Amino acid sequence: MALGCDDGTPDAADANTAADAPADDVPAVGDASDAASPLDAGSDASPMDAGPGLDAPAPDTTPVDDLGLDAAPSDLGADAATTADADATADVTADAATDAPITDAAVGDAVAADVPAMVDVPVMVDVPAVVDAPAVVDVPADAGAADVPPLMLPPAPTAPPVECSVADRTGSPAVNVDSDTADSQAPSVVWTGSEFGLAWSDLRHPTPEIYFARFRDATIPRGAIDSVTRVTVEPAAGAGANEQPSIAWDGTRYWITWSRVTSAGVGSIRAASVTPAGATASTIGPTATVSTGTLGYTARPSLVAIPAGEGGGLAVAWEDDRATDNAEIYFARLDAAGARSGAEVRVTTADGLSGSPRLVHGPAGELGLGWIDERHGSPELYFARLTVAGARPAGAADVRLTTDALVTANPSLAFDGTGYGIAWESEAGVPDRPAVFFALLDARGVRRPGAPDLRLSSNLPGGAARRPSLAWSGADYLAVWQDERPTHTGGDLAMQRLSALGARVGAETFLYDDTDASQRPALVWAGTQFLVAWEDDQYSHRDIWYRRILPTECRP
């Protein structure tokens, strides 16, 4: 069952396999899918595909796909003061340049440093059972001040898409971080203030394992990356699958959370620290189990660092169907040592599946959460304010952001110091052909006046635009997504800059134009430049690549 999210499954080769898997199935060795999950098939499959215990609507024939997690938020800077609690909330809808092929600058495979076999570290064994949050307030479908009438499709960009220039492609070359012949997927990237940390799921063993690399220069060849480190080591091939990493930086060390599914079909959210040791080496901390569910699956964690002035540590949200086949969003706070601080919090309790959470730090003392929710029957985009302990502030209600009758999926959320930008994909208007959309929200999650929703991609009615990743630079937003229109065979990365007021800046632009699938981008702002990491099939298998995007680059 997919619910507007990707989950680690290769595209065409595994189309529609995961959606039919029973709840206790696990991915085949070498298949980095999340087949046990009823929210399993990603954005290429309909979120309406039924999981265990659900009645399926018309079957989806599009390829099953994987997670494509966004760059994990780790905002450690000063944030704006907390805003007032939300009112009744809103319910609205929201190529002609010369080709410059990506070149592999590899000189040889970086040696992966294997760590000892994974040890499960119980996390605060005396923590009480999971605490269910009070039932969420369901906002009526017609509530709020809508600036876009429900079901009205925002118009496509008026300017035709352009290509990033050959000069810009040459000046900021794509770098292959991992050229092992096995598939690598689901990158997550973070900037520490001095270097990048990159995590992904890797099938070279062939059981899916979590890998990590750190580097300073976004243009260096992959062979010059001295530290490629294996974070997880399964005790035996096929014992479990480690996928869907989310990475954050707490000011001293990296933290990675991920989803693990055992051969018995039991899922859990895991966490481990990665501490830089000198210029290139890294020390892997013990693996801890964050979630307490023992049935069903847990998937798609989203990790964020909490500033020291707000207690420090980390917060993580994920989807979990421990109680029933009805997946819900759960939350946990981790202390500075990675131990769970207090009980887990069940964030959603409404009928219908909830999944694909995206968690970011917002105004001081608050987090913003975006997710996909089926409480109204079809997958819709929702937003909620949370305290750093996972509770809703007094008077804060869930905000329903879309009213589409068709599929809404894969949200990406960023905080700009005043409010939030949110991007997502939706099949609004054209079934099986999602486009990418953007909305500007205030700190309560309500659409900002005078900033109507935008359709960022011009792919309709042909092709598909999927899995947007959004980042804020301090001056403007950048959205990057996977674009599969017929003019770009296999799928390439497209991007759109957006002003602080939610207006387009320049034209929709393709980063590359080749015949190999480029997909699942993860974007981060790094002080003077953006960095995007993604999966690419350039060598007939999936590798992790990255490139910088300077503020002056890829502008028409």
Image (spheres, rainbow, N blue to C red):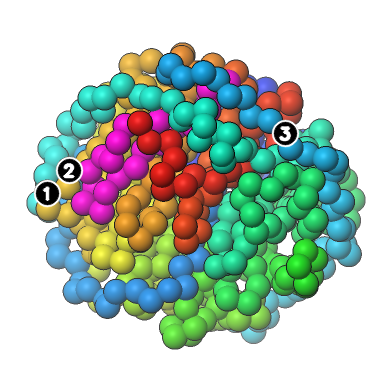
Is residue 37 left or right of 392 when viewed as pictured?
A: right
Main SS, magenta region, reads strand
Disc 1 versus disc 2: distance between alpha carbons?
A: 6 Å
Residue that carries the numbered disc 2 in the rendered image? 452
Residue at x-position 54% and y-position 46%? 548
What stretch of residues is rendered in magenta?
490-514
Whether label 1 touches label 2, CB < 8 Å: yes
The local crowd at label 3, few if under 14, some if 14 to 19, many if 20 or more residues have their Cα within 10 Å, is some
Residue 151 in the image: x percent, y percent?
Answer: 19, 32
SS under mark 1 = loop
The kind of residue tagged 3 is Asp
Q: Residue 550 versus residue 75: which sits nearer the camera? A: 550
The local crowd at label 2, few if under 14, some if 14 to 19, many if 20 or more residues have their Cα within 10 Å, is many
Residue 116 in the image: x percent, y percent?
Answer: 88, 64
The kind of residue tagged 1 is Gly
Residue at x-position 27% and y-position 62%? 419
Residue at x-position 23% and y-position 25%? 158
Disc 3 versus disc 2: distance between alpha carbons?
A: 41 Å
Residue 450 tag number: 1
Is residue 118 left or right of 102 when viewed as pictured?
A: right
The kind of residue tagged 2 is Pro
The local crowd at label 1, few if under 14, some if 14 to 19, many if 20 or more residues have their Cα within 10 Å, is few
Is residue 474 left or right of 62 when viewed as pictured?
A: left
